[in-house]
Amino acid sequence: MSMPARPAPSTGFRLRNLALPATSLAVLAAATTYVGLVDPRESGHYPSCPYLVITGLPCPGCGGLRCVHALTHLDLPAALGYNALAVALFPLIGWLWLRWAVRTGRGEPRRTLADPRWLRALLAVVLVFWIVRDLPFGAALAP
């Protein structure tokens, strides 16, 4: 019994293929707008980081909401102070989204986000950032 043939990717760009990338962008824009309008430095609007509550140490994502809030107000120095890794990763995330949207629009088959070696490297960077920001000499990286 033979497997059905995989459909060939369509040629040309199709707007109807962009439903999922457009929806994800709309959700991200709405969340960013909310964080931009509702200051994370004021208590009661967002949950606390469980890792920070349990250990008293910041995780790699700690300061991320304050970072996004600062970026929505065009305050890059404050954003870097809250979470420099997030600021560094936002352009990468934007590029990955754009690549996904273009490939989806062209009807190309789905692929993984990146080569496993790149994912391992990213994980290593996050882990090093996490460890360094929790050490005394890396206090400047803590939010």
Image (tube, grey):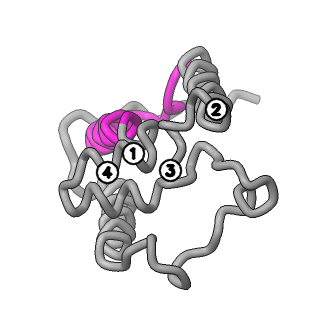
Mark 1 to mark 4 CA distance (whole Å): 5 Å
Residue designated by label 1: 81
Residue designated by label 4: 78
Q: Is residue 103 magenta?
A: yes
Q: Residue at x 51, y 82 (%)?
A: 45
Q: Secondary structure at mark 2?
A: helix
Q: Secondary structure at mark 1?
A: helix
Residue designated by label 2: 136
Callout 3 crowding tier (Cα within 10 Å): few <14, some 14–19, many ≥20: many
Q: Which residues are magenta?
A: 88-115
The front one of 122 and 70 is 70
Q: Amino acid at mark 1?
A: Gly
Q: Please state if 1 lies on the left or on the right of 132 as rendered.
A: right
Q: Disc 3 or 1, which lies upstream in sequence?
A: 1
Residue designated by label 3: 143
Extreme residue in the right direction: 54
* Figure quadrant of residue 65: bottom left
Mark 3 to mark 2 CA distance (whole Å): 13 Å
Q: Is mark 1 in CB contact (under 8 Å) with mark 4?
A: yes
Q: Is residue 89 magenta?
A: yes
Mark 3 to mark 1 CA distance (whole Å): 6 Å
Q: Disc 3 or 2, which lies upstream in sequence?
A: 2
Q: Residue at x 59, y 35 (%)?
A: 133
Q: Amino acid at mark 2?
A: Pro
| Position in image of residue 136 (x %, y %) | 64, 32
Q: Please state if 14 lies on the left or on the right of 101 as rendered.
A: left
Q: Secondary structure at mark 3?
A: loop
Q: Secondary structure at mark 4?
A: helix
Query: Which one is in front in this view, the residue at disc 3 or the one at disc 2?
Result: 2
